[in-house]
Image (cartoon, rainbow, N blue to C red):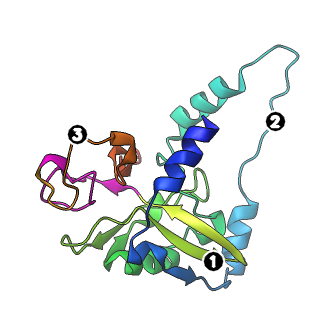
Amino acid sequence: MASGLEEAWSRLTLTEDEEQVIVCDEDESEERIEQIALYLWGKLLTDNYFNPGVLKAVLKNIWKPTPGAYSVLPLKQTVEFSKVLGSQLGIFLSCNEANLYCGADKSMNFQVELDITKSLRRGIRMVVRGKTLWIRLGYVKLPDFCYGCGKLGHVLKGCDAVGDTDSDVSALQYGEWLRASLVKSKKK
């Protein structure tokens, strides 16, 4: 598996937009640091065997966090940071603060107006606290798009940029993994 992943990574070609590295300010507010300090951590006290994976699945089902793990640090899960990320993709429209789960799964949801003549961005390279991170992007309600060039409006069979569509599917630069689903929080 590891060699397959390394091989796929070596075939990945970043677009000009994806090559850009954004340097992020380190201006975490004291209020945000206090919010993170109030996370709920727990320990299961039992002498009986239990399956940690099942426990995690049950807690996720109860708490219903946003799906996906997109590498956004908990201190950066703010409306301001979503504006920074959104402005890298297009025109930032909105971010629902209720969807910022304080690091439950390292994801954020925000709306942006995209230029559909460009390829979809698969991620954003960002330097935070001296570390370069790849923040993976996922798109909600994404229509059909080309797995070869990443543009909306056609699929792989109609793509002039890729040419032969009978080529190895694993060599394609885009895929179904760009689709993200949005779980709406329960109304009280």
Q: Is residue 187 visible?
A: no
**Which residue is at a point 63% across and 39% down the rendered structure image?**
2
Q: Disc 2 on helix, strand or loop?
A: loop
Q: Earlier in the sequence, mark 2 or mark 3?
A: 2
Screen quadrant of the N terminus: top right
Q: CA distance from mark 2 to mark 3?
A: 52 Å
Q: Which one is in front in this view, the residue at disc 2 or the one at disc 3?
A: 3
Callout 3: few (<14), some (14-19), or many (20+) C-alpha neighbours within 10 Å? few
- Residue at the outermost top position: 48
Q: How many marks?
A: 3
* Residue occupied by mark 1: 127
Identified by mark 1, the residue type is Val
**Which residue is at a point 53% across and 53% down the rendered structure image?**
9
What main secondary structure does the magenta stretch of the protein show? loop
Indicate the position of residue 165 as horizontal and vertical percent values. Answer: 20, 45
Q: Nearer the viewer, residue 163 or 115?
A: 163
Highlighted range, magenta: 138-157
Q: Earlier in the sequence, mark 1 or mark 2?
A: 2
